[in-house]
Amino acid sequence: MPRTSGISLTSTERVPGVPDAPGLAATGVLALAYLGLFAAVAVPSSPLFALFALLVVGAEFAVWRVAPLSAWALARVQLGLPWRWAIGAAALAALEARLSGPNTSLDVLVVVCAAAVGICGGVVEGLAQVVEYLRKSPVISRGLPLGGLVLPREPRALLHQRSRLLWPAVLVLLVVPALAAGTMLPSWLGATAAVGAAAGAVGVVVWSLVLAAETRRARPRSRVPEAVQAAVTELAPDLVLYYGGTADALYQLEMWLPTFESSGHRTLVVLRDREALRLLRPTTLPVVCIPAGTALVAFDLSTVRGALFVSNAATNIHLIRKGGMRTAFIGHGDSDKSSSRSPFTKVYDEIWVAGPAGAERYAGWETALVSDRIRLVGRPQAVAAPHRVRCPGEPATVLYAPTWEGWGDEPYHSSLPYLGVDLVRRLLATDGIRVLYRPHPLTGTRDAGVRKAHHDVVALLQEVGAQVHRDAAPTASASPAEADALALMDAAARSAAGGMHREPGATAQFWAEAPATTHRVVEGSWPGLSSCFEQSDALVADVSSVVSDWLALDRPLALTNPEGLDAAEFGERFPSSRAGLLVGPDLAGLDAIVADLLAGQDRTRAQRSVEREHLLGTPPETGAERFRAALDQLVEQAGPVPSGF
């Protein structure tokens, strides 16, 4: 499923995504259906009321399925499902009064039964939340053997479909008494239906009570953390790879997984977000998720000698304060962006950068104090690839990989709103060029202008038949999206690879799905950026870590200069830009790199070689070996575990 299913950059509550056309249609039908109930009361007409009651239940189901934002928003304005049920019941009581007069026995019975169904709905919702709490273990894991721990079965119907459990009772309660009030059915049948609906609701409550009692007896909130702690103690990890962000930015962690999988160390991945654990791509590394800071501080990691941090999340301090381990900031890319030299790095024992350029970025007054902590370790992800040979008649592929708008309000951070559409249009108008568009995973999450430019670029490519891919990597045993953490954990415990594994040959199959002449849009987390690199002959990118990783391939490069700065000034501000041509507002640099591609020339090879070593270290190809050596030294230099932790 797409990573960007909801807005969750700063909040622990995931707000559902904006509904599409079917979701908006379902929401509109729901509103009209409830209005229709009162229109039927105004007539009055029991058949019309029954028709709109059927429409209400159908629309409620549709909104639940395709418009989660509408359901979320209605609940926030005190129009949640129980209140909507009350509106339906009030409409039914009004219809009864208009058709058969007030104070009839059927009216009283219907009101009592409607109240009973509403109360039962509230009780079921409460019990579902109790079960959710009991199943929400403070510590969860993936890829760790849990011994003889038997996890309680997931009551999926109660947890994920509780709003639907009483819909049959509501439907019967609204339709049959309404028809009976209009003398289309016997009064006794209306009364029986009302009582039956209430009895069915009571039955659902009893069933929910049984599930809650069963979950309580299983004690997952205490037994699961104990089992995970035992598994980690037995593993005795010497390294922790820490990620304190949300699921939206998982790429920051995932780029490091292959490196640590082959590091030779017993590495434990520590996450702080449950959704991040659910969406984390397959890995052979054991993973624990500990959302609460108090739980992490109490978790025994006494064998860990080194902790590596991929981002400057505020929650990093929870692990740093444990002590007993040497900490290093490795970041999530080596670039000239301001985020690559944050003053926050003062909290770490070491700061790891790829090459001399990375060390020079910390020369400013805000970060000068950390200069003695910087270690040059190479860039293990920057792997050289053989020269790309195109088949006869195959177009040259230009990869456009812009960055996102960033956390601050710095202008020209992304080229998309300034150059994106014109740049892609110019490429599409050039014979012999295929476009591969790979935006940053967070593109458009903070700036509507960037988001619009991204959509315009995708639409432009779709007009010429581009293939658009937004899905995550295929796995052999993907878990249901609605499964809760314990259900996923149970599935993962039964698999040596964390419950999922990569489908063999999936990446090659993806690229083979369309001819080499087809333009492509890759928005999802898979295939990875390195896979896009392999398919490309030249790169057009913003100032970002994409540039450093691309340089390992030693292929033509152009950097965007949307502000139109002088080349000397731009090179002084962003040294990595010296490795290629500049694409300014007039797109002149783009024309130059395309002309070189089509003519088989490479005018920037010499300067690219110099910047390659400056950014990636010397020699760039030894990045993986140097990084492993740095890991070994980090473990060796760690001091003893302080007492009292």
Image (cartoon, helix red, strand yellow):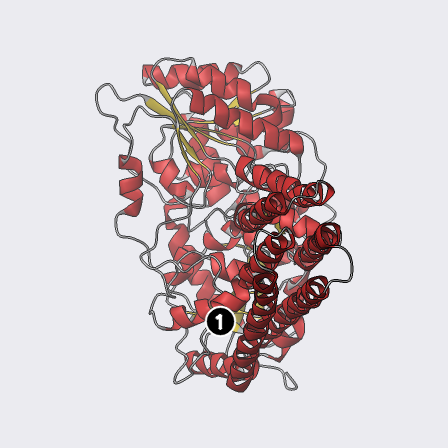
Q: Which residue sits furthest right?
A: 102
Label 1, secondary structure: give it.
loop
CA neighbours of label 1 inside 10 A, class few (<14), some (14 to 19), many (20+):
some
| Number of marks present in the image shown | 1
Task: Give the residue type that dot 1 points to.
Answer: Pro
* Residue under the image location 38 percent in, 23 percent down: 465
Coordinates of residue 302 in the picture (x, y in percent): 54, 80
Q: Is residue 69 above or below residue 520?
A: below
Tell whether 507 sits left or right of 619: left
Tell whether 86 sits left or right of 577: right
* Residue under the image location 43 percent in, 13 percent down: 429
Coordinates of residue 227 in the picture (x, y in percent): 47, 82
Residue wearing tag 1: 155
Q: Is residue 73 above or below residue 417?
A: below
Q: Is residue 515 above or below residue 241?
A: above
Q: Is residue 644 above or below residue 494?
A: below
Closest to the observer: 547 or 404? 404
Coordinates of residue 3 in the picture (x, y in percent): 51, 48
Q: Is residue 243 visible?
A: no
* Residue under the image location 61 percent in, 43 percent down: 48
Closest to the observer: 479 or 505? 479
Closest to the observer: 374 or 533? 533
Coordinates of residue 280 in the picture (x, y in percent): 46, 57
Closest to the observer: 457 or 32? 32
| Residue 446 lies in quadrant | top right
Q: Is residue 495 visible?
A: yes
Task: Give the position of the C terminus as an image quadrant.
Answer: bottom right
Q: Which residue sits furthest left?
A: 392
